Amino acid sequence: MKAFYFKPELCDLCRKCEEACSNACKKYRSLPSSKALPHVRAFFSTKGPILRFCKQCEEPPCVDACIGESLQMGPGDFVIQDESRCIGCFMCNMVCPNAAMVPSYIHKKAFKCTKQCDFSDSAPPCVKSCDRGALTFEDVIDTTKKIRRKRMAEIPRK
């Protein structure tokens, strides 16, 4: 399974990922708005850039909180969304630990990244737009192995 990874030290807050996400989502969303909301959102904090996006929790609280059953566990333990069932209660937004749900008060619905933005090749549009390499879409097992090896190498040996 592949997942998004964010490297804040490489991010310059250009927000190209937000623009690419919004443009890609416009193609498949059936909303009356001329511009779709980005599911990837970049912010500056006192600790540097942060990126808010769905990290696909193992036990997602948004699924349990969804009254209209708009959010459900799909194939491969991926949180999927049926936007037509969203009743706009925004409970998912309140319980999401990553602030990944995007509330739209105009549409009276909450949205999340469902990876339906038609990326048949290796990476979603938000990742392709990041020319600095701050946002990547990688295999979870391979990436966690790399991270562990790097951390192990940093531990001083006696």
Image: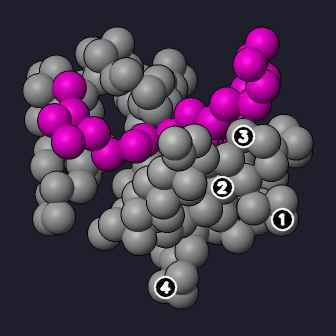
Determine the secondary structure under disc 4: loop
Question: In this rendering, would 77 be left or right of 106?
Answer: left
Residue at the far bottom in the pictured view: 121
Determine the secondary structure under disc 3: helix
- Numbered tag placed on residue 131 in the rendering: 1
Question: In this rendering, would 88 be left or right of 73?
Answer: right
Asked whether the viewer can see residue 80, the reply is: yes
Of pointers 3 and 2, the one earlier in the residue sequence:
3
Q: CA distance from mark 1 to mark 2?
A: 9 Å
Callout 2–callout 4 Cβ contact below 8 Å: no
Q: Position of residue 149 (x, y in %)?
A: 48, 60
Residue at the far front in the pictured view: 158
Queried whether the magenta region covers residue 38, the answer comes back as yes
Please name the residue that numbered disc 3 is placed on: 8
Queried whether the magenta region covers residue 110, the answer comes back as no
Determine the secondary structure under disc 2: strand
Query: Which marked residue is nearer to the observer: mark 1 or mark 4?
Result: 1
Is residue 144 placed above or below 91 in the rendered structure? below
Q: Residue 154 versus residue 37: which sits nearer the camera? A: 154
Please name the residue that numbered disc 2 is placed on: 135
Asked whether the viewer can see residue 22, the reply is: no
Which amino acid type is shown beneath numbered disc 4? Ser
Please name the residue that numbered disc 4 is placed on: 120
